[in-house]
Image: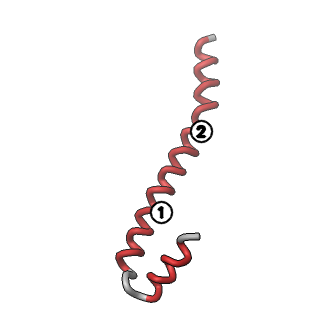
Amino acid sequence: MAGSIIIIVILFLAPIGILLSSSIFAAVFTSLLNRDVATTHQGTELGELAESSGTS
């Protein structure tokens, strides 16, 4: 009986953990890409365009 409850809890929590970890990875990856673009294209027209379209 206890094993069944443990399996049900794991099956319920596993997708939540996967979704949360992937969203955290996406947030970190996006911030790293934005930092790279800011340093690579600093002072160029492309950098100015990225800055103007990044904020609403």
Residue furthest top as drawn: 1
The quarter in which the C terminus is drawn is: bottom right
In the rendered image, residue 6, in percent from the top left (x then y), is placed at 58, 20
Q: Nearer the viewer, residue 48 or 35?
A: 48
The answer to whether residue 18 is left or right of residue 31 is right
In the rendered image, residue 21, in percent from the top left (x then y), is placed at 51, 45
**Amino acid type indicated by mark 1:** Thr
Secondary structure state at the residue bearing disc 2: helix
Instruction: Measure the C-alpha gap from mark 2 to mark 1.
Output: 21 Å
The residue sitting at 51% across, 56% down in the picture is 26
- Marker disc for residue 30: 1
Which label's residue is closer to the chain start, 2 or 1? 2
Residue furthest bottom as drawn: 45
**Is the residue marked by circle 1 packed among few (<14), some (14-19), or many (20+) residues within 10 Å?**
few
Residue located beneath label 2 in the image? 16
**Is the residue marked by circle 2 packed among few (<14), some (14-19), or many (20+) residues within 10 Å?**
few
| Badge 2 vs badge 1, beta-carbon distance below 8 Å | no
